[in-house]
Amino acid sequence: MDILGENRDKLREFCYFCSMIDKIVKYFPNLTDRQQEQFEAMMKLYPEWNEKINVISRKDIDNLEESHILHSLAIGKFISFSPGSRVMDFGTGGGLPGLPLAVLFPDVHFHLIDRIGKKLKVAADIAEKIGLTNVTFQHGDSGECRDKFDFVVSRAVMPQPELVKLSRKNIAREQQNAIPNGVIALKGGDLCAELRGMKSSETVDISNYFEEDFFETKKIVYTPIA
């Protein structure tokens, strides 16, 4: 038995996950030990699940911490949800951006919706294994959900006008955050055509928050809904 080799592999794995946690802590220095442990566990579980169900592009799984988890957390730079807020993750897939945000905001409830049951199963399993108690899941179309939320978040699911149209019924009237209730979407590329006519929408460059090259073309689009 190659004990030295096994120990070397374990040390390499430990250093790898420490470096990923360091990147998150760099931008979110006030994370508790529990939150750091949850992110570390999340970054182990996604690759394990991805071997069975392709929830993240196989060529991109090595960039999990930056292209997926940190990208999801950009919403947490745009807004610090007030405790007690309710947020719907529209088209969550395998749990992005909902699960990273649920770790970041343990006092906020996140409701994750997706049409694809096997992907939602991955999200639910990861949530359970990392000990998240502030998330619920719904398999099906968002039209089947009549609950009210302060915000609907999404990650490159559909054009903003369509997303706003479908989400409007789910936005609560009562306000409890620093900005009006509405839709917050993670997007990339040139959005001029997509946002034409949406004068109330605000676009923010994620490169304002994160310095990695990946974020140079990534944006947050926020549309308040009265």
Image: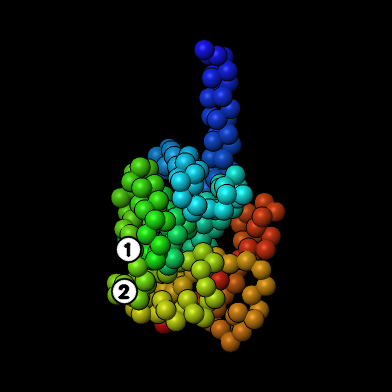
Q: Nearer the viewer, residue 50 or 24?
A: 50
Q: In the picture shown, does residue 16 fall above or below 192?
A: above
- Report crowding for label 1: few under 14, some 14 to 19, many 20 or more residues within 10 A (C-alpha): some
Q: Amino acid at mark 2?
A: Glu
Left or right position of 11 against 48:
right
Under circle 2, the secondary element is: helix
Query: Compared with residue 139, is residue 33 higher up or lower down, i.e. above or below?
Result: above
Q: Is residue 169 above or below residue 215?
A: below
Tag 1 residue? 138
Picture layout, residue 18 above or below residue 65: above
- Circle 2 sits on which residue? 144
Q: Position of residue 211 (x, y in %)?
A: 67, 52
**Residue 32, numbered label:** none
Q: Could you tell me which secondary element the residue under label 1 belongs to? A: strand
Separation (CA) of disc 2 from disc 1: 9 Å
- x and y, in percent, of residue 152 in the image: 42, 69
Choose top left, top right, bottom left or bottom right for residue 35: top left
Residue plotted at (44% across, 82% down): 165
Three-letter amino acid code at disc 1?
Answer: Gln
Label 2 CA crowd tier, 10 Å (few <14, some 14–19, many 20+) = few
Instruction: Answer yes or no: is residue 78 visible.
Output: yes
Do the CB atoms of the residues marked 2 and 1 lie less than 8 Å apart? yes
Say which of 196 and 179 sits in front: 196
Of the numbered discs 2 and 1, the one sitting upstream in the chain is 1
The answer to whether residue 196 is left or right of residue 35 is right
